[in-house]
Image (spheres, rainbow, N blue to C red):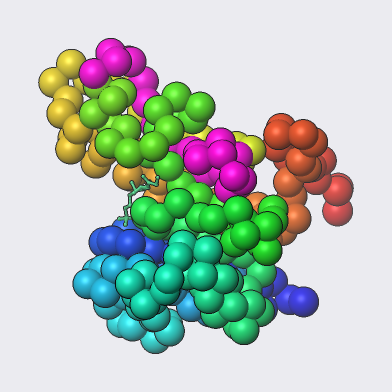
């Protein structure tokens, strides 16, 4: 497989700035992949419109049309399998994935999260970081396993927390870093540069040319 045949499926729920960072990195040649499909659980997610603008297939899958989370996730997995996706990237996807979905794409799902995991998993994490009084926060790209925000860490970036910050100003500062590390982490996976032992991800030695 040439690297540009590497197919990504992106799952979104909202505005899609991380999706946009991935699209931009592909378009400027930093990321040697193509997005085969973007799927949202929310009909009005601006991320869907971003995708269409770039000629990327954008699909809304309505959770209400499925009897259970498991059925939704199995249908979601089928959509991705039908497009022979190599990697599933969660980009502001706000549904917790079922164990069935995670089993189907085991080791092939990654997420971006706006804190320095394992600190502050879950939701509203910028506010939690401020309330806790940490002096630094940041973002984490990690593999997805059955523990929410608990999978092996691929890349992190650190930002300072200022005394004057509110959740929004901190989120904005973190987001700048998210847009840098997410495409970078994806490209590392595409290049097969990650060595994973237990939950520790390290970079393989590069082979001298
Ligand atoms: C991002 O900050 C992302 O890290 C976060 O949602 C935002 C989505 O923004 N994800 C999570 O909190 C997942 N637990 P975007 O739609 O503009 O990429």
Query: Is 22 part of what is drawn in magenta?
Result: no
**Residue 57 seen from this side:** yes
Q: Is 165 placed above or below 29 here? A: above
- Which of the 4 image quadrants contains residue 19? bottom left
The spot of residue 82 in percent (x, y) is 62, 84
Q: Locate the N terminus and report the quarter of the image it occupies.
A: bottom right
Residue 187 found in image quarter? bottom right
Identify the residue at image location x=43%, y=84%: 57
Residue 31 makes an appearance in the image? no
| Front residue of 48 and 70 | 70
Relative to 206, is 186 on the left or the right? Answer: left
Q: Is residue 122 above or below residue 111?
A: above
Q: Is residue 192 above or below residue 54?
A: above
Residue in view at x 40 percent, y 45 percent: 178
- Which residue lies most toward the front here? 67
Please indicate whether residue 107 sits to the left or right of residue 138 in the image.
right
Which residue appears at 32% of the width and 44% of the height? 175
Residue that appears at 45% across and 24% down: 119
* Residue closest to the eye, 139 or 149: 149
Q: Left or right: 4 with respect to 27?
A: right
Would you say residue 140 sits in the magenta stretch?
A: yes
Residue 3 is left or right of residue 170, and the answer is right
Q: Which residues are magenta?
A: 131-151
The percent coordinates of residue 27 (x first, y second) are 46, 73
| Residue 134 in the image, given as x and y percentages of width and height | 33, 15
Q: Quarter of the image holding residue 169?
A: top left
Between 192 and 166, the one lying in front of the other is 166
Horizontal and vertical percent position of residue 64: 33, 72
> For the view shown, which residue lies furthest in the right direction?
208
């Amino acid at each position: 497989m040439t690297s540009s045949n590497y197919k990504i499926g992106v799952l979104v729920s909202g505005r899609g700035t991380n999706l946009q960072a991935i699209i931009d990195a592909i378009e400027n040649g930093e990321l040697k992949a193509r997005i085969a499909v973007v799927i949202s659980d929310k009909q009005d997610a601006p991320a869907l419109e971003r995708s269409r603008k770039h000629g990327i297939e954008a699909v809304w899958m309505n959770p209400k049309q499925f009897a259970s989370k498991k059925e939704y996730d199995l249908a979601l997995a089928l959509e991705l399998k039908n497009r022979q996706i190599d990697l599933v990237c969660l980009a502001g996807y706000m549904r917790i994935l079922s164990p069935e979905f995670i089993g189907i794409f085991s080791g092939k799902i990654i997420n971006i999260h706006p804190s320095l995991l394992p600190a502050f998993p879950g939701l509203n994490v910028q506010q939690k970081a401020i309330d806790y009084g940490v002096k630094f926060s940041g973002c984490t790209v990690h593999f997805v396993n059955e523990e929410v925000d608990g999978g092996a860490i691929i890349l992190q970036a650190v930002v300072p927390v200022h005394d004057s910050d509110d959740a929004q100003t901190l989120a904005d500062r973190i987001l700048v870093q998210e847009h840098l590390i997410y495409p970078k982490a994806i490209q590392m996976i595409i290049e097969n540069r990650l060595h994973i032992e237990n939950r520790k991800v390290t970079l393989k030695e590069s082979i001298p040319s």
